[in-house]
Amino acid sequence: LELERDLRSALINQQFRLVYQPQIALSTQKLIGFEALLRWHHPERGEIRPCDFIPFAEQTGIICAIGEWALDQAIAELSYWDQSGLPLVPVSVNVSALQLEIPSFADSVIERLNLLPVHLRSNIALELTESTLMQNQALESIQALCAADIPLYMDDFGTGYSNLSIISQLGLSKLKFDRSLIQNVPNNNAHQKVCSALLDLAGALELEVIAEGVETPEEAQWLLEQGVLYAQGYWFCHPLESAQVVHYLKEHQ
Ligand code: G
Ligand code: G
Ligand code: MN
Ligand code: NA
């Protein structure tokens, strides 16, 4: 109950911020995008990680307001970097299953993006999770977002139960392989088999892959050899505060 009260006031009191984790092309080590990740600075408890409050924010429905804030914030920061003359790279924003179940969600995203200058519009992507895909309203939302040419990434791929026939029909642009698949993959035969099979599937569906949670050069090398194009993880870069993003973009332009 206390957490619910604190979560509600957190938005008003501006205790949330986004950090940005670089996504890298494995063959060139070049920056190809950022994932926006939520952080909560609680006045008494300090930093609270999303895994410790997002499930609760979902139970109480507060995640929808937080999600709107996160999208607006990512759009505002992207616009600011662009206006500052920094190189433009796509930013992907996480979307909760609950948001997709709101009938007006897709229209409200499209409306927000339509306020942006044209050259920025295709640089906001949405990350969806597999568990969202069963609800009819969620599917309708995804179809509307896809029809509006918003890049959609399937997050945490390989963990939930995937409805592969649905995944093939969603108009996704990328699959993000969950970090549990990547962890120690060069030394784990079972992970290698699963990864290879899922990569074949991604290839058959003509979906590009971002491997998540890459922590070692051996993992990066193995993925590169398997033909994975993109990666994200501590080996390349931890999530950056938005002020650090400015420096990072200057160095990578
Ligand atoms: O940054 P970290 O590894 O602690 O994130 C943990 C989880 O929180 C991840 O699964 C991520 O998808 C989720 N998450 C991070 N930011 C957001 C957000 O803005 N909205 C939603 N719905 N989930 C987020
Ligand atoms: O579920 P989602 O993929 O949206 O969440 C990504 C989460 O994983 C973020 O909270 C981020 O901080 C975390 N993360 C990013 N890179 C790594 C990594 O290399 N190792 C681990 N353990 N976590 C990572
Ligand atoms: Mn994500
Ligand atoms: Na993930």
Image (spheres, rainbow, N blue to C red):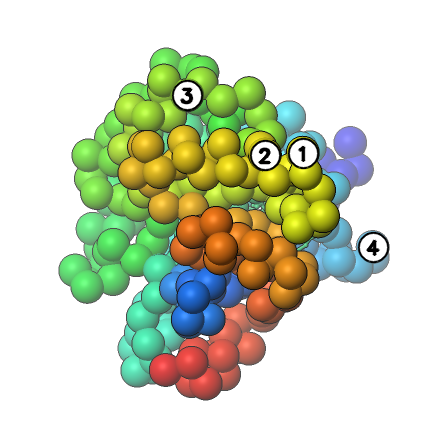
As displayed, is residue 178 above or below residue 168?
A: below
The residue lying toward the viewer, choosing from 234 and 62, is 234
- What x and y, as percent, mark residue 108? 30, 39
Return the disc, 3 or 2, that comes first in the chain's sequence: 3
Dot label at residue 153: none
Whether residues under marks 1 and 2 lie with C-beta atoms below 8 angstroms apart, the answer is: yes
Tell me the CA gap for discs 3 and 4.
Answer: 41 Å
Foreground mark, 3 or 1, reads: 1
Q: Residue at x 36, y 20 (%)?
A: 166
Whether residues under marks 3 and 4 lie with C-beta atoms below 8 angstroms apart, the answer is: no
As displayed, is residue 70 above or below residue 127?
A: below
Can the viewer see residue 77 in this picture? Answer: no
Q: Which residue is drawn at 36% across and 73% down?
A: 80
Q: Is mark 3 on a helix, strand or loop?
A: helix
- What x and y, as percent, mark residue 53? 70, 40
Return the disc, 3 or 1, that comes first in the chain's sequence: 3
Tell me the CA gap for discs 3 and 2.
Answer: 18 Å
Foreground mark, 2 or 4, reads: 2
Task: Please tell me how crowded label 4 is: few (under 14), some (14-19), or many (20+) other residues with Cα within 10 Å.
Answer: few
Type of amino acid at the residue the image marks with label 4? Arg
Give the residue pinned by disc 1: 190
Task: Please tell me how crowded label 3 is: few (under 14), some (14-19), or many (20+) other residues with Cα within 10 Å.
Answer: few
Type of amino acid at the residue the image marks with label 2? Lys
Looking at the rendered image, the quarter that the N terminus falls into is top right
Tell me the CA gap for discs 1 and 2.
Answer: 5 Å
Return the disc, 1 or 4, that comes first in the chain's sequence: 4
Task: Please tell me how crowded label 1 is: few (under 14), some (14-19), or many (20+) other residues with Cα within 10 Å.
Answer: few
Whether residues under marks 2 and 4 lie with C-beta atoms below 8 angstroms apart, the answer is: no
18 relative position to 68: left or right: right
Foreground mark, 1 or 4, reads: 1
Tell me the CA gap for discs 3 and 1.
Answer: 21 Å
Can the viewer see residue 113 in this picture? Answer: yes
